[in-house]
Amino acid sequence: MINIVLAGPRGKMGQEALKMIASEKNFKLLAVVDRIIDPNLLSQLDSYDMKETIIATDIEECFRNVKPDVFVDLTNPEVGRSNTLCAIRHGIRSVIGTTGFSTEDIESLSKQCEENETGCIIAPNFAIGAILMMKFSQLAAKFMPDVEIIELHHDQKKDSPSGTALKTAQLINESRGEGAAIKIDNGPARGIEISGINIHSVRLNGLVAHQEVIFGGTGQSLTIKHDSYNRTSFMTGLKLSINSVMNINTLVYGLENIIE
Ligand code: NAP
């Protein structure tokens, strides 16, 4: 049995995660951390014994009262950053789906994990198809180094570019060597340049999470595209991360490092 505390249970991802956790026989939800106490929050989960689940508003206090095996964060970058630090300092393994962490955040959390000998998985995208999109892009970049990324998300998304786009750019940059053409123009309508790759962010009502990685070559182009149509697409990866983090004592950034 893996005992879990989840932060962000009223959110779009948190709601989906609650259903997934409740449906898994070897997962038990000890507590949720929220900004408010909503007595109806857990009533939707009819398969679940809610009387045993604590709703906490203070994460420190929560960890003083319950000792989970895994902490899951699905909030926002500011809250997620301090929640993760708090969990690691308490020696609690963490699975962080929250996006918007900087490279410095990840490096500093990684150090904390080493000092506390605690495992943590930070996964900007739990969708297996999105991980494959990144892997295929990494391969394509070896042969077609000229590339741009268009990422499209719902209009409530707080960070841009998306964590997935940043990670894709980083992976492509690692594999394409020196082959990329010199950039022609970086005017204001050319997106943001990350790791030498232009990323364009679209935010629209009706979208969930989508990304196109477009490679250009002489007389040809290759587009690798992934679409998450709803948030259940993220739950297989979240489940995998919760199970996997039990066996690691360092920080792992990206689900691609877990699925292989
Ligand atoms: P959302 O609907 O805005 O949910 C965030 C939730 O966090 C809200 O219920 C918010 O409450 C709550 N919250 C804010 N402060 C909190 C605190 N101090 N303690 C506990 N909860 C707090 O966002 P979402 O779409 O669920 O996404 C959540 C995060 O996951 C985002 O960073 C998003 O980019 C990321 N995400 C990751 C993946 C992945 O595969 N890794 C996929 C999709 C999204 P209020 O509404 O009251 O502020």
Image: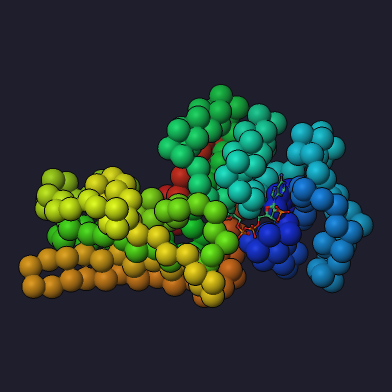
Residue at coordinates 17% horizontally, 58% vertically from top-left?
A: 146
Residue at coordinates 92% horizontally, 57% vertically from top-left?
A: 51
Residue found at the very far right of the displayed protein? 51
Q: Position of residue 22 (x, y in %)?
A: 75, 64
Q: Quadrant of residue 144?
A: bottom left
Residue found at the very far top of the displayed protein? 115
Relative to the observer, which residue lies in front, 237 or 248?
237
Q: Is residue 254 above or below residue 127?
A: above
Q: Position of residue 76 (x, y in %)?
A: 61, 48
Residue found at the very far left of the displayed protein? 218
Residue at coordinates 57% horizontally, 45% vertically from top-left?
A: 77
Residue at coordinates 82% horizontally, 62% vertically from top-left?
A: 41
Q: How is the image coloured?
A: rainbow
* In-image side of 82 versus 193 (left or right): right
Residue found at the very far front of the displayed protein? 188
* In-image side of 27 versus 47 (left or right): left
* In-image side of 48 versus 239 (left or right): right
Q: Quadrant of residue 206?
A: bottom right
**Quadrant, the C terminus:** bottom left
- The answer to whether residue 129 is visible is no
- The answer to whether residue 220 is visible is yes
Relative to the observer, which residue lies in front, 186 or 216?
186
Q: Position of residue 225 (x, y in %)?
A: 35, 71
Relative to the observer, which residue lies in front, 204 or 188?
188
Q: Quadrant of residue 24?
A: bottom right
- Which quadrant of the render holds ligand 1? bottom right
Q: Position of residue 12 (x, y in %)?
A: 65, 64
* In-image side of 117 versus 176 (left or right): right
